[in-house]
Image: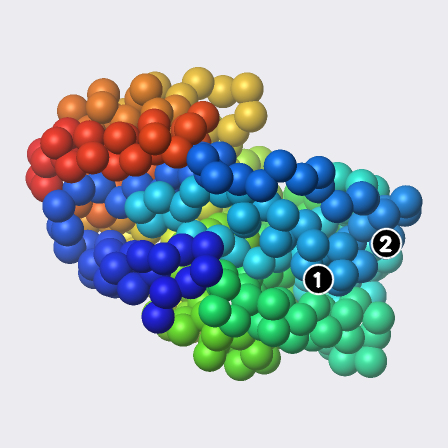
Amino acid sequence: MSLEFKPDWEETKERYRAFWAHEYFGRCALAVTAPRDDAPDEPPPARPTTPYQRWTDLDYAAASNSWAMCRTFYGGEAFPVWTIGYPGHTAIPAFLGCRTELDFETGWWHPIVLGEGLEEVLELRVDHAGEWWRFTLKALERAVRESAGRCIPSIGAFGGCGDTLAALRGTDRLLYDVIDRPEEVVAAEAYLMEMWCEVYEEFYYIVREVSEGSTSWFGFWSPGKTYAAQNDFSYMISPKMFRELFLPTIERQTQYLDHTVYHVDGIGAFAHVSELCELPRLQAIQILPGAGKPSPLHFMETLKMVQKAGKNLQISLSPEELEPALAQLSARGLFVTTFCTTESEARELLKNAERWSIADR
């Protein structure tokens, strides 16, 4: 089927299938967005007056999504995603009882596991009667209704390895825990990942039909279950500690999902890339240097490590960097995300990507 805001959706799905299979389809995967030439000249919907309303008013979310989508050209592997945003109120820490504080741009959790050890984590349960769980189901159901025939609903951003535990415990306490009680960290992580799989299963049941699979906060589509695994806490620990305490949980996540991309966020986390490359069911790795850091192309050794391991590679570049990137990297399994200032520039970049791409280097 075609989508209102993505007429070539059928062809795009086939390219995603090829990407996940590490097959070459004539160019690198390229998700390029730009302002549409025929964008209507209308102001955005008025933002609610409080942070709580800003993140919970589903009528506002619907109006904001529609306003943005009808003004955006989605080229190549880019496609429209319906979302209410990801400040943390629809995530596992909130479902487990962490007080979730919101402002207009983001949100944060207040830790609840404040004792000496981590045994308390194993007693936590998702509060299915809680405000944020009920709201999340309502938001997903609204996303499905709004998306039908128009776009793809996001399954959300609800946590993952290491970071959920850091939210429950507090990052500073968890830094002591990984030294003082590593066995408890491993047990807590295993418990939380099984919970994560159960949450995903329930959310997937809601979105799967309209999504014809799924997408998440990361913006990759899969004909099955997909999500971006991550562990931002890993920025602060050694590769040995990462391998022993957290890698088994990430592997469990890849075993549950059909297609997984790992979000390596920040140059401090690059030390774990070689460990991640060993996971047999991890299909793709994103290399993201982080805010204020040089382009991913400054870390060519890390990029080539991912490709040499046979993994797909995702990077975000400026349009001007695409040609030099393709002169150094294999187009097979390479996924580039970029933004152009005009629709015609985006269309030209897609044509050039075919000329510049070489399947294997």
In the rendering, at what x and y percent does residue 241 appear?
A: 49, 46
Mark number, residue 60 = none
Which type of secondary structure does the marked residue at label 2 adopt? helix
- In this view of the protein, which residue sits in the foreground, 2 or 339? 2
The residue positioned 52% from the left and 29% from the top of the image is: 290
Q: Amino acid at mark 1?
A: Thr
Crowding at dot 2, Cα within 10 Å, few <14 / some 14-19 / many 20+, comes out as some
| Image vertical order of residue 194 relative to residue 277, above or below | below
The part of the image, by quadrant, that contains residue 96 is bottom right
Upstream in sequence: badge 1 or badge 2: 2
Above or below, 236 against 133 in this view is: above
Residue on which disc 2 sits: 53
Circle 1 residues within 10 Å: few <14, some 14–19, many ≥20: many
Residue at image point 39% right, 24% down:
318
Q: Is residue 24 visible?
A: yes
Numbered badge on residue 90 = 1
Residue 182 in the figure: left or right of residue 173: left
- Horizontal arrangement in the rendering, residue 182 relative to residue 227 (left or right): right
Corner quadrant of residue 158? bottom right
Name the amino acid type tagged 2.
Answer: Gln
Q: Is residue 248 visible?
A: no
